[in-house]
Image: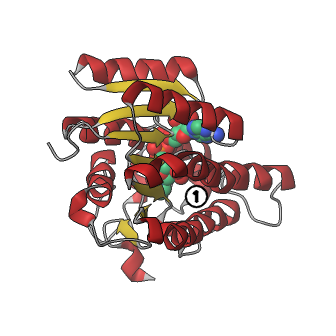
């Protein structure tokens, strides 16, 4: 039981990756708090995992709101007694659109959720993580270091998440709090299912309506990632097995990043 009663907070907790991460961490002995916007959805996600015999709670919170995140962290500490890990998986996608046409408020919204929300969540959890000498994993993307057609707001936001990760890792290294970024490639979650539904024809040359198959070309390992594969890498980064790893990015992308 790798985590042996340690508590881990996951933002974006009722999303595809969040739930898979919770299942893995709790299966390894962690007490997990899922945090997400919709109280009903996060309670439902937590209840399902509790039904599997796992120690999971749901907390409604908005990562873009400082007081909401402060309350969420306080609730988790009150329930579990400490906070040992944070995963910032909350994020939103961008509808495929040229930067020339992108509405400025839409641009700002994506930066607010993906970048500022990550910053707020880290800052809210930092005092408790310093106290526990805990660990943080941010969720950036393979697009943090590569351009994608018609994804200027999303790619820029994920590049900022990667930069923030290194910055926070440096500033928390005297306290021995490790901070790393997960850089997923295309992963079968509701976020991608929605992208296929709304952007399919624009996002990729090949139109395979309603099918995740359209993401396969260009992935050296020839398939999408599963959410559990992202969870496995995140579990490693959070755990003592990664005790000398900080300020870096782990790409779980089937080899996409090696293509440049
Ligand atoms: N799925 C992919 O292919 C992929 C690839 C690379 C990176 N990512 C990143 O991985 C992370 C998880 O994505 P996913 O695929 O599980 O998507 P998802 O849409 O299933 O989950 C994202 C969750 O974040 C929550 N969220 C959004 N704004 C929030 C806010 N302000 N406060 C709290 N919660 C909020 C949503 O409600 C949702 O439950 C995201 O940051 C995403 O950008 C996903």
Q: Which colour scheme appears in the figure?
A: secondary structure
Q: Image point 21% across, 62% down: which residue?
A: 241
Query: Residue 211 is drawn in which quadrant?
Result: top left
Residue 71 falls left or right of residue 211: right
Residue at image coords 40%, 38% = 82
Q: Is residue 40 above or below residue 152?
A: above
Q: Decide which of 175, 215 is in the foreground and name it.
A: 175
Tag 1: Cα neighbours inside 10 Å, few (<14), some, or many (≥20)? many
Residue 70 visible, this angle? yes
Q: Along the horizontal axis of the image, is 220 left or right of 157?
A: left
Q: Quadrant of residue 221?
A: bottom left
Quarter of the picture containing the N terminus is top left
Q: Position of residue 63 (x, y in %)?
A: 63, 41
Looking at the image, residue 143 lies above or below residue 223? below
Residue at the spot 20% in from the left edge and 21% down from the top edge: 53
Q: Residue at x 62, y 37 (%)?
A: 70
Label 1's element? helix
Observer-nearest of 187 and 162: 162
Q: Is residue 96 above or below residue 166?
A: above
> In front: 175, or 160?
175
Q: Residue 60 in the image: state x and y as whole percent.
A: 56, 26
Q: Residue 144 location, x and y as percent? A: 54, 69
Question: How many discs appear?
Answer: 1
Furthest residue in direction left, as rendered: 1
Task: Please tell me whether residue 228 is drawn above or below residue 165 in the rendered image.
Answer: above
Residue 210 visible in the shown view: no
In the picture, measured across the screen, residue 107 lies left or right of residue 257, that is right
Residue 214 found in image quarter: bottom left
Q: Nearer the viewer, residue 6 or 225?
A: 6
Relative image position of residue 4 (x, y in whole percent) = 20, 40
Lateral position of residue 77 relative to residue 4, left or right: right
Residue hosting label 1: 203
């Amino acid at each position: 039981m790798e985590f042996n009663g340690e508590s881990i907070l996951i933002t974006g907790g009722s999303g595809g990756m969040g739930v898979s991460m919770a299942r893995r961490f709790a299966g390894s002995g962690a007490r997990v708090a899922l945090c997400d916007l919709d109280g009903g959805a996060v309670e439902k996600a937590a209840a399902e995992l509790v039904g599997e015999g796992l120690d999971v709670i749901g907390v409604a919170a908005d990562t873009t709101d400082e007081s909401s995140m402060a309350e969420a962290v306080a609730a988790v500490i009150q329930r579990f007694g400490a906070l040992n890990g944070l995963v910032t998986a909350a994020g939103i996608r961008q509808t495929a659109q040229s930067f020339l046409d992108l509405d400025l408020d839409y641009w700002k919204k994506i930066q607010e959720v993906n970048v500022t929300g990550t910053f707020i969540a880290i800052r809210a959890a930092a005092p408790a993580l310093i106290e526990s000498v805990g660990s943080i994993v941010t969720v950036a993307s393979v697009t943090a270091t590569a351009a994608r057609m018609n994804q200027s707001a999303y790619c820029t936001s994920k590049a900022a998440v990667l930069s923030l990760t290194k910055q926070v890792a440096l500033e928390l290294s005297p306290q021995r709090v490790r901070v790393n970024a997960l850089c997923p490639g295309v992963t079968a979650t509701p976020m991608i299912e929605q992208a296929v539904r709304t952007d399919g024809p624009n996002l990729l040359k090949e139109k395979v309506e309603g099918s995740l198959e359209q993401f396969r070309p260009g992935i050296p390992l020839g398939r999408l990632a599963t959410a559990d594969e992202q969870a496995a890498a995140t579990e490693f980064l959070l755990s003592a097995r990664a005790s000398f790893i900080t300020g870096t990015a782990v790409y779980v992308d089937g080899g996409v990043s090696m293509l440049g």
